[in-house]
């Protein structure tokens, strides 16, 4: 079997280890004898929905989002929407997640139109409050920063978040999970991420896949099943991954109280 991974804007959109998601997919497939071809899809490159099985996009600052949003809309948009509608798997992190929604309003109030794959929109907290980001303290006051813990069915997922944007899912939109620890979508409704078909949007940097092998395998399976029918993945020894996972859980438990709303003292 072979998996074709389309990696969007690797030279612009990759923060807090997001490129590690590509390495994790390649390695977890290699351990199972599955070949992976990675297509780097920069500004100007087309997406071929018949070729790609899995799309990955990472995070970036508002300035990075300004560099790519027009290309995302005008060069890649239709193909990505078609791909997602046809069941291509996808993992869009933070800035990538925001631009796959209807729009992202930046810190200074510019509204960047998005793909509308996720029925959601995002507004930077500074644009909501009118906070001038002229000091470190001011910039920090509007950001959700730290380890994030998300309940995803029977699983706990861990990641790192650092964003000013607040994402609001519209009625009927399905979140990825519920917040156990951290801000997630908007630090208010207790939800994190969004799911459409096999496409997942999330605020989990890290990279997410190295600490959450169950999530990586979920997307590998979805990506391969579209091309090969139902696929069973051989189990792997994820001992190291869960050492990192549990360490991140402990660190999450140490986050300042406002972000420990749903934790109590059980974890860590
Ligand atoms: N620029 C966006 C925000 O601040 C996304 C940040 C990111 O990808 N880490 O919300």
Image (cartoon, helix red, strand yellow):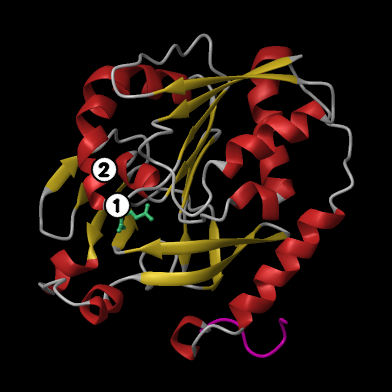
Find numbered disc 1 in the image and state the secondary structure of the residue it sits on.
loop
Q: Position of residue 130 (x, y in %)?
A: 10, 72
Label 2 near ligand 1 (CB < 8 Å):
yes
Query: Dot 2: what SS?
Result: helix
| Residue that appears at 37% across and 17% down | 79
Could you tell me if residue 189 is visible in this image? no
Within 10 Å of disc 1 (Cα), the crowding (few <14, some 14-19, many 20+) is some
Residue 211 visible in the displayed image:
yes
Q: Position of residue 209 (x, y in %)?
A: 64, 47
Query: Which quarter of the rendered picture does the C terminus lie within?
Result: bottom right
The residue pinned by badge 1 equals 61
Which residue in the protein does label 2 denote?
65
Left or right: where 137 falls relative to 149: left
Q: Is residue 120 above or below residue 146?
A: above
> Could you say which quadrant of the image residue 54 lies in?
top right
Residue occupying the point 89% across, 39% down? 235
The boundaries of the magenta stretch are 261-268
């Amino acid at each position: 079997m072979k998996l074709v991974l389309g990696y969007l804007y690797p030279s612009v959109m990759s923060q807090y280890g997001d490129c590690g998601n590509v390495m994790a997919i390649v390695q977890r497939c290699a351990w199972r004898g599955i070949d992976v071809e990675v297509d780097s899809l920069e500004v100007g490159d087309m997406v071929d929905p018949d070729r790609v099985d899995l799309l990955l996009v990472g995070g970036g600052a508002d300035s990075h989002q300004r560099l790519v949003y027009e290309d995302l809309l005008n060069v890649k948009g239709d193909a990505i929407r078609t791909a997602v509608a046809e069941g291509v798997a996808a993992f869009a992190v933070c800035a990538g997640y925001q631009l796959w929604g209807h729009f992202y309003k930046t810190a200074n109030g510019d509204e960047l139109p998005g793909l509308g794959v996720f029925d959601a929109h995002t507004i930077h907290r500074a644009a909501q409050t009118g906070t001038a980001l002229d000091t470190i303290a001011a910039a920090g006051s509007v950001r959700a920063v730290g380890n994030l813990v998300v309940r995803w069915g029977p699983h706990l997922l861990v990641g790192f978040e650092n964003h000013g944007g607040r994402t609001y899912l519209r009625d009927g939109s399905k979140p990825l999970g519920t917040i156990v620890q951290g801000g997630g979508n908007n630090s208010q409704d207790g939800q994190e991420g969004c799911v459409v078909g096999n496409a997942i949007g999330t605020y989990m940097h890290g990279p997410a896949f190295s600490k959450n092998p169950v999530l990586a395998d979920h997307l590998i399976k979805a990506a391969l099943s579209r091309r090969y029918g139902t696929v069973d993945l051989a189990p792997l020894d994820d001992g190291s991954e869960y050492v990192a996972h549990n360490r991140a859980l402990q660190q999450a438990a140490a986050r300042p109280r406002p972000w420990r709303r749903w934790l109590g003292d059980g974890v860590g």
